[in-house]
Image (cartoon, grey):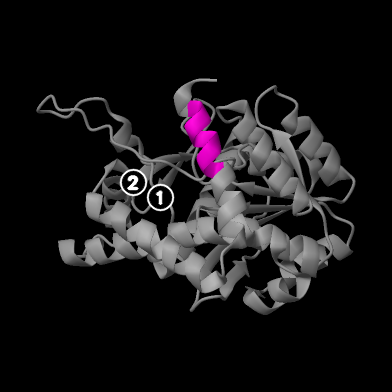
Amino acid sequence: MSPRDRLTDGLYGLGWGAVRKLPEPVAARLGRTIADIAWKRRGKGVLRLESNLARVVPDAPPERLAELSKAGMRSYMRYWMESFRLPSWTAERVRENVVIHDVRHLTDGLAAGRGVILALPHLANWDLAGVWVTRTLNTPFTTVAERLRPESLYDRFVAYRESLGMEVLPHSGGSAFGTLARRLRAGGLVCLVADRDLSASGVEVTYFGETARMPAGPAMLAQQTGALLLPVTLWYDEAPVMHGRVHPPVEVPRSGTRAEKTSSMTQALADAYATGIAEHPEDWHMLQRLWLSDLEPRTAGGESRAAGGGTRAGEGRT
């Protein structure tokens, strides 16, 4: 393990150990302080966040974008402070601090014995939403995590999410899709963070007026298994409450090729995500490049346009 990998692993270990033991007001202040310091430094992640937010609120002046990016960094650090402490949250606390709207779309699908896919963007705290599912609905689910470096860090994330009641599959290896399909055919629940895919297999969608790529997995799983595909968006209210909305099902088109159906369904997911992000842009944690135009290596003037930041580690993709 390289020195950098050891440092990364050590910092996450410190977060799960030390932050979890702090009094909640102290942990919240620590998160805001770290967020404000990062925002003032104007690093690549902050600049990328502001660039992304400029697509969401195109008429916003620079000072408004700066306000949103500062609020966004605070929201992002709130995610981390909560996540480090989630293993100690009781079921009662989860019920009191998470409000899910239109949850009937999910519960009706599960009650019917039909597999359900929840597809989410990078909004608020999807780990907390997952804990609400496992502890309030008493429903386990399966998700996917990308392999992280160092391996010990990936193991930490898997152990953390499994402790919250989630089955975690590695993204690499090619077997995740088949396992997810089996869980869905058995009437199970699958949850995926599914709003960014820069691979060649990503589906192109129109997102806030520009072209981006999103994973094909949710739409393909729904087609192959007959599972219900439900977009979900999240947002923070005044601490400590988080809200979520389960959007109406994305239906499989009656006609068209598999690729055409996948494209249409993925666009429907993108539209639902865009609605939630436009309503709560400060809770959108997209510190990486997303639109294809940002992936072009050179501008007309010859300068590199590539700029990105970190993202939430261990997130599901398929």
The residues colored magenta run 5-12
Query: Residue 282's x, y, as percent?
Result: 38, 64
Residue 177 in view (yes/no)? yes
Amino acid at the residue labelled 2: Glu
Question: Helix or strand or loop: what does disc 1 sit on?
Answer: strand
| Neighbours of disc 2 within 10 Å: few (<14), some (14-19), many (20+) | few
Residue 4, x across and y down, in percent: 45, 27
- From the image, tell me which residue sits under label 1: 207
Q: Classify mark 2: helix, strand or loop.
A: strand
Q: Confirm whether the magenta stretch covers residue 20.
A: no
**234 to 286, vertically: above or below:** below
Residue under the point 65% across and 31% down: 171
Mark 1–mark 2 CB contact (< 8 Å): yes
Q: Quote the CA–CA distance across marks 1 and 2.
A: 5 Å
Residue 31 versus residue 242 in the image, above or below = above
Q: Quadrant of the C terminus?
A: top right
Q: Residue at 33%, 38% (x, y): give it.
A: 308
Report the quarter where the N terminus lies. top right
Give the residue type at disc 1: Tyr
Left or right, residue 247 beside residue 69: right
Q: Nearer the viewer, residue 274 or 96?
A: 96
> Horizontal placement of 225 versus 95: left or right?
right
**Residue 126 visible in the snapshot:** no
Say whether residue 292 is left or right of residue 21: left
Label 1, residues with CA under 10 Å away: few <14, some 14-19, many ≥20: some
Could you say where residue 200 lies in the image, as x and y percent from the top left? 49, 25
Give the dominant element type of the magenta stretch: helix, strand or loop. helix
Q: Which residue is mark 2?
A: 210
Residue 11 inside the magenta-drawn segment:
yes
